[in-house]
Amino acid sequence: MMDSVKNASENISRRLSRTWDHISDGWRELVHHGSDALTHFVHRKGEEDKGQASAASTPAFPHWSILAGDMEETDREIVVRIEVPGMEKKDFEISIEGKTLSLRGEKRFERDTNDSKYHVMERAYGVFQRTLPLPVEVNEDKAEADYKNGVLTVRLPKLNVEKRRFISIS
């Protein structure tokens, strides 16, 4: 009987240890890959109170959120994709200065009714800015942007793309 209790206890201890390792790995990966994507949202004065029954019955807006994205480089261009759901094209301002891409926007809080209260509020709202260093200089005049299904895609043609010429050996 004592051996089975001891074995069960050791088994539980091993499982808890493995679970803790997985959680720790997840946090390390989030901090490593998500730290640049962590974006501060600034609320306009009075924004948090707008349309809410009472401050006590509704959680405050989060001020930080992750705007996850990726940057891909081909022979001819840099392609940046950033997930920003719940916005419209008019809510974005995109600029390039040197080798830096800046994305500014405003994610607005919209509420269908005032006769409800929130129990969980994890999405951030307000004005935000995200800057991304570019690996090469790009042709700003030929840059294009598209917003579809909550993903902003910015295509940045490389500047001075040289055509590769192969030389045959005689």
Image (cartoon, rainbow, N blue to C red):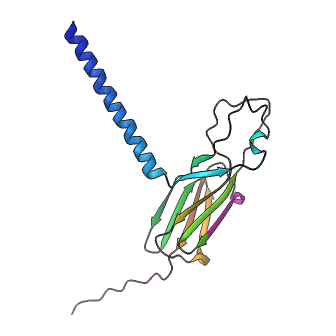
The structure residue drawn at horizontal position 72% and vertical position 59%, both measured from the top left corner, is: 90
Q: Is residue 64 above or below residue 139?
A: above
Q: Is residue 3 above or below residue 170?
A: above
Question: In screen coordinates, is 23 left or right of 98?
Answer: left
Q: x%, y% of residue 100?
A: 55, 69
Occupied quadrant, residue 130: bottom right
- Residue 117 drawn at (x, y percent): 73, 29
Q: Quadrant of the C terminus?
A: bottom left
Image side of residue 70 versus residue 21, left or right:
right
Quarter-of-image position of residue 156: bottom right
The quarter of the picture where residue 23 lies is: top left
User: Residue 159: image x %, image y %?
Assistant: 51, 80
| Residue name at image x 28 percent, y 26 percent | 14
Residue at image coords 46%, 64%: 72
For the image, the number of numbered tags is 0
Extreme residue toward the bottom, this view? 170
28 lies left or right of 154: left
Residue 92 magenta-drawn?
yes
Name the side, left or right, on which 124 lies relative to 138.
right
Q: Residue at x 38, y 39 (%)?
A: 24
Q: What is the span of residues highlighted in magenta in the rendered image?
A: 89-95
Using the image as rendered, state which of residue 116 and residue 170 is in the foreground: 116
Vertical placement of 155 versus 81: above or below?
below
Q: Nearer the viewer, residue 168 or 156?
A: 156
Q: How far across and how far down the image is residue 19, in percent?
A: 35, 31
Q: Quadrant of the N terminus?
A: top left
Q: Is residue 145 above or below residue 30?
A: below
Q: Is residue 104 magenta?
A: no
